[in-house]
Each structure stands twice: as C-alpha cells, then as structure tokens.
Image (cartoon, helix red, strand yellow):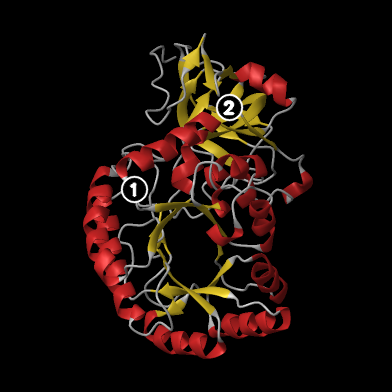
C-alpha cells in the first residue's frame, strides 16, 4: 500500500482546517449537515467577490463587466453578482426572469442565443432588454412585436466573425455557425434595422470560450475591434455597446496554468485608445461566465459503497453524471480527463490509494474519477469535485434514471 502523503490537487484553492475542506469558512462535514443531504453544490460567495476584484484591478476601468448567466443561473449566485458586475447576458426566457428579479436595470441586460421564441422576444422588448439578433428572422419578429407593443425594440447584432479564438475549448465563431449573423451579411441587416426603426445598440462579437492563452485572447480582441470598426460604417446610428465576449478560461486538468490577465488588461488599454477615436460613443463590454464562478464552486457527494473488482477499487457515491455531467467527461471532452477530485473530509490523510469513483447510475459512463490517487476512503466519506461552479447542475441530465435532485447553496 502506498503510504506517501497525497498531493491532493494543485488546483485546490480552498483552505483546510482539522483535515477538512473549508467552503465559505465552514468545515465540509458541518456544511453537509447544514445542507441536510448529499449530493449538493456549494458556491463560495467570497471567492466570487475576489474574482471580480481581481478583474477590476487588472482590466481597464472603462471596461464594463457582464456576467453570462448560463454559466450558473442559481438565483442566489445571480443576486450576489448583481451587486458586483455592470450587466447580465442571458440565453433564455428563464434566465431573463432570474435577471429581472435582481436590482440590475433592464437596460444593462442583453439576450443572446439562437431560436428565441416570439414570446421571449416580446418579453425582452417589453422590459427594455437588448436583443442580440441571431438572424434576420429574429429582426423581423422583433420589429413586428415592437410595433404591436408600441415600443422601439432595443437591438444589437450578434456577429459570426470571419475568425476564431485560437486554442479555445469551444469555438463560437468563424466558419459556418448557428450563432449570430455572418459578418459579410451584417451590413445589409444594419440597413434593415434602420428601415424598420429599431433602436440600434451595437454589436456582440464572441469567437470562443475556455481559453488559457492570453496571446490568443489578445489577438481575437484586436480582430474584434477591427471588425466592429468596419461594420460600424454601415450602422444606422452610433454604436453604443460593443460586447467583445470573453473567452477567459480556468484550469481543470494537471499541467494547466491559471490565465494571466495582466497581458490582456494592458492590451485592452491600447485598443481602447483607438476605440475612443473610432467609436467614441460606445462602451466596451467583456462578458464572462465560467471565469467568474467556476473556481468558486464544489460538488459534494457521499461514498455509499466500497468494492473491489478484479483488483480495482471502486468507491460508489450517491452522486454522479446526472448531476455533474462535465465531471464525468461527457460534456465537451473528446478524450476523457479527470476533474480535480478530493476526499474532502480527509485532507490530512497520509495514506492514499488508486481508486475509481463512480456514481449510482447503471451505465459505465457514470465515472467521476478514473484510477486517481486519493486519500484512502470508505463508506460515509465525502467526495469533492473542484472547479464545479460553472456548467454543473444546470448542464446535467438531472432526470436521468430518476435519482433524487441535488441541492445548491451559496455560502
């Protein structure tokens, strides 16, 4: 048996006390008792606050920081962020309701995403939310609904650029895409916006996400500004908002380094100097989701069985892919890698062993950790999946096999 002290994960930024992980300064077992059940997600509000402060310190003061609610739509998280950021970006009518329940003014909220329903478009117009148009069909619907309501729709054009964010985990622009309007077709759409009498706000140009390479982000931002300048020549009115997306990633796997945003901040300063001459009436928006909340969250489940099959140790937990699809490797991974996993109530344990942590679903896909070196654990111990604050519960097939629902708490 390997007796060396486990290194846990270099990605763990949560403190420990008496061998337990602290979430919001609360020991893990106490937090589990407070929640009343496992599995659960816990989000550390102070870590979210600190991440926003970090951005404010390194990004230019003129940058308007928006939160992309799709990363984590838990109402308490969104409420907390409403006091920290300058605006919200939505991807559904459900998210719109969550956003409108906060103090955030509707004028600081935008709504992107393909396939918006007529009802969603009507609600956005009625509340003063800016519609990021994904197609000419959406423009026609917005104009029609605005006429019926007697309100000029606030619209921006989501542009599918002719470039992509290199080395991004998920490419959202460049080439054929269901998102936005191809850059070469935008001038004609801008003309129609003017003819239809909509309240033109600006552009949303988002080329990729989950990027850990500041040089690639800077290159994409340069191209984004240049594209906006060209498109603005056909705009029916001055550009008021230029949403350049985000793409800021967080590390998940061994060898990945945290994104250094000092280079990005300096580069944005240079871009803003030119922007003040080219688009003097516009405010620049950086839209972030995962980067704001991803590292502030953990998923916690309890070991309910321990078994050995042909020499391999399995820790069977009461949580799995139905509540944390991303950690199982079935949410965007081409080659499965283990998320950072810990035994959260045995942080001082010196004995470790190689185990696989599996969930309760009757499928080999329900794998939370594959042959990882973890502190030796047994029935009743708490498995913690780090980096779980974004695209966790809401991105998982919670109805799969009808297992009980997980709880979410902000601490």
Residue 137: image quadrant is bottom right
- The label nearer to you, 2 versus 1, is 1
Q: Is residue 237 above or below residue 214?
A: below
Q: Nearer the viewer, residue 399 or 243?
A: 243
Image location of residue 362, percent across then percent down: 70, 44
Residue under the point 43% across and 40% down: 52
Q: Dots 2 and 1: beta carbons under 8 Å?
A: no
User: Among all residues in the image, which is located at the extreme top?
Assistant: 18
Assign the C terminus to one quadrant of the image. Answer: top right
Q: Is residue 316 above or below residue 344?
A: below
Q: Nearer the viewer, residue 197 or 209?
A: 197
- Inter-mark Cα distance, 2 to 1: 40 Å
Badge 1 density bin: few <14, some 14–19, many ≥20, Cα 10 Å: few
Image location of residue 269, percent across then percent down: 24, 53
The kind of secondary structure element at disc 1 is loop
Residue under the point 53% across and 39% down: 388
Residue under the point 48% across and 37% down: 387
The kind of secondary structure element at disc 2 is strand
**Left or right: where does residue 406 sit relative to residue 52?**
right
Which label is found at residue 161?
A: none
**Left or right: where does residue 19 sit relative to residue 73?**
left
Kindly identify which residue carries mark 1: 61
Which label is found at residue 383?
A: 2
Assign the N terminus to one quadrant of the image. Answer: top left
Image location of residue 328, percent across then percent down: 55, 44
Q: Look at the image and tell me whether residue 44 can be seen.
A: no
Badge 2 density bin: few <14, some 14–19, many ≥20, Cα 10 Å: many
Q: Nearer the viewer, residue 344 or 81?
A: 81
Q: Look at the image and tell me whether residue 135 can be seen.
A: yes
Residue under the point 65% across and 21% down: 31
């Amino acid at each position: 048996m390997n007796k060396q002290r486990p290194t846990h994960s270099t990605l763990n930024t949560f403190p420990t006390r008496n061998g337990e992980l602290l979430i919001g300064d609360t020991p893990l077992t106490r937090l589990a008792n407070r929640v009343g059940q496992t599995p659960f997600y816990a989000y550390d509000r102070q870590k979210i606050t600190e991440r926003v402060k970090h951005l404010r310190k390194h990004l230019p003061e003129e940058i308007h920081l928006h939160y992309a609610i799709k990363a984590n739509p838990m109402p308490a998280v969104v409420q907390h962020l409403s006091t920290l950021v300058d605006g919200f970006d939505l991807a559904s009518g459900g998210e719109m309701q969550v956003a409108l329940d906060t103090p955030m003014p509707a004028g600081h909220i935008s709504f992107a995403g393909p396939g918006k329903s007529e009802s969603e478009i009507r609600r956005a117009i009625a509340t003063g939310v800016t519609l990021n148009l994904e197609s000419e069909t959406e423009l026609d619907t917005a104009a029609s609904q605005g006429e019926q309501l007697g309100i000029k729709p606030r619209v921006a054009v989501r542009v599918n650029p002719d470039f992509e964010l290199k080395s991004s985990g998920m490419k959202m622009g460049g080439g054929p895409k269901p998102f936005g309007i191809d850059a070469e077709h935008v001038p004609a759409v801008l003309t129609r916006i003017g003819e239809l009498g909509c309240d033109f706000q600006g552009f949303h140009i988002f080329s990729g996400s989950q990027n850990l390479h500041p040089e690639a982000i800077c290159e994409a931002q340069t191209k984004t500004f240049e594209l906006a300048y060209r498109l603005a020549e056909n705009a029916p009115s001055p550009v008021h908002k230029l949403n350049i997306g985000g793409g800021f990633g967080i590390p998940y796997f061994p060898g990945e380094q945290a994104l250094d945003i000092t280079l990005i901040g300096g580069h944005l300063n240079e871009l803003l100097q030119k922007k003040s001459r080219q688009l003097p009436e516009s405010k620049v928006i950086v839209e972030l989701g995962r980067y704001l909340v991803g590292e502030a969250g953990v998923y916690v489940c309890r070991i309910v069985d321990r078994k050995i099959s042909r020499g391999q140790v399995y820790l069977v937990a009461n949580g799995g892919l139905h509540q944390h699809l991303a950690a199982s490797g079935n949410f965007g991974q081409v080659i499965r890698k283990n998320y950072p996993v810990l035994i959260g109530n045995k942080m001082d344990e010196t004995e470790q062993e190689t185990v696989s942590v599996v969930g309760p679903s009757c499928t080999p896909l329900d794998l939370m950790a594959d042959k990882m070196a973890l502190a030796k654990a047994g029935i009743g111990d708490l498995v913690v999946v780090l980096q779980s604050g974004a695209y966790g519960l809401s991105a998982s097939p919670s109805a799969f096999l009808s297992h009980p629902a997980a709880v979410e708490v902000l601490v």
